[in-house]
Image (cartoon, helix red, strand yellow):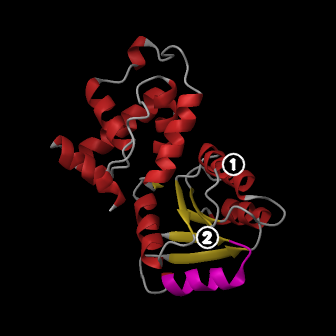
Amino acid sequence: MRVLIADDHPLLREAMISTFKQYPDIQVVAEAVDGEAAVKLSAELKPDIVVMDIVMPKLNGIDATKQIKKLSPNTAVLILTAYDDDRYVIGLLESGAVGYLLKSAPGRVLVDAIRAVYQGESVLNPEIIAKLLKYGRQKQTAENHLKPEEQITNRELEVLKLVAQGMSNKDIAKTLFLSTRTIKAHLASIFSKMEVASRTEAIIKGVREGWLVLDSTPTDRNKE
């Protein structure tokens, strides 16, 4: 997994590099000291994952993420920050970030998050998902805008609701007694029909369409 670290604090970058050196499946390909450098290096190197801070010189994490997703759409952006303010959370997730971790998280959690993102999953803790559901509810539309041939099936709706509970593909597969491959296929179909590119966007749009409600908050099990 080729990783680019974007953070303006040298000590934090050094700490992450030191942590990643313990895991042979993670390779740090570059360091960016500001948002502009993060965009430039992402366009040049096309890393698998960018570990991105929010507050950086020249270009903030939100705008940098937007530009990275345009220039290198296959690069996943994982936010690692000290801020969990609603405006930052929603802005970053809407800009295309697939995960959001606080800097207080242990190194092992960050490594697991990188691996999950590499596998195509979002990394959002229960509190972040709750913010998404609340935000989506505020933006909810009065009617379903999908065409009849694009309507998601009952099974796909089941999968979407479990996604909104913060479950991984593996957990969803166990819950529905299906294979992980089948869950991935359902998610691909959901994303295509809803015209979204990530679980985060699917959750937001699902609430807007009225398919997900605020009761679809993460279970206590997911907080463990």
- Helix, strand or loop status at disc 1: helix
Q: Please state which of residues 9 and 29 is positioned toward the viewer in this rendering.
A: 9
Q: Which mark is residue 4?
A: 2
Return the residue found at the far left.
177
198 to the left or right of 189: right
Is residue 14 a member of the stretch shown in magenta? yes
Residue 125 location in percent, x, y?
A: 45, 56
Q: Amino acid at mark 2?
A: Leu
- How packed mark 1 is, by other alpha carbons closer than 10 Å (few <14, some 14-19, many 20 or more), is some
**Residue at horizontal 64%, vertical 80%?**
13
Residue 121 location in percent, x, y?
A: 41, 53
Q: Quadrant where the C terminus lies?
A: bottom left
**Residue at horizontal 25%, vertical 42%?**
182
Is the C-beta separation of discs 1 and 2 under 8 Å? no
Q: Amino acid at mark 1?
A: Lys
Specify start and end residues of the magenta stretch as a single range: 7-19
Kindly tell me whether residue 198 is visible in this rendering: no
Q: Which mark is residue 66?
A: 1
**Residue at horizontal 22%, vertical 47%?**
173
Residue 53 location in percent, x, y?
A: 66, 65
Magenta: main secondary structure equals helix
Q: Which mark is residue 85?
A: none
**Residue at horizontal 67%, vertical 52%?**
88
193 to the left or right of 53: left
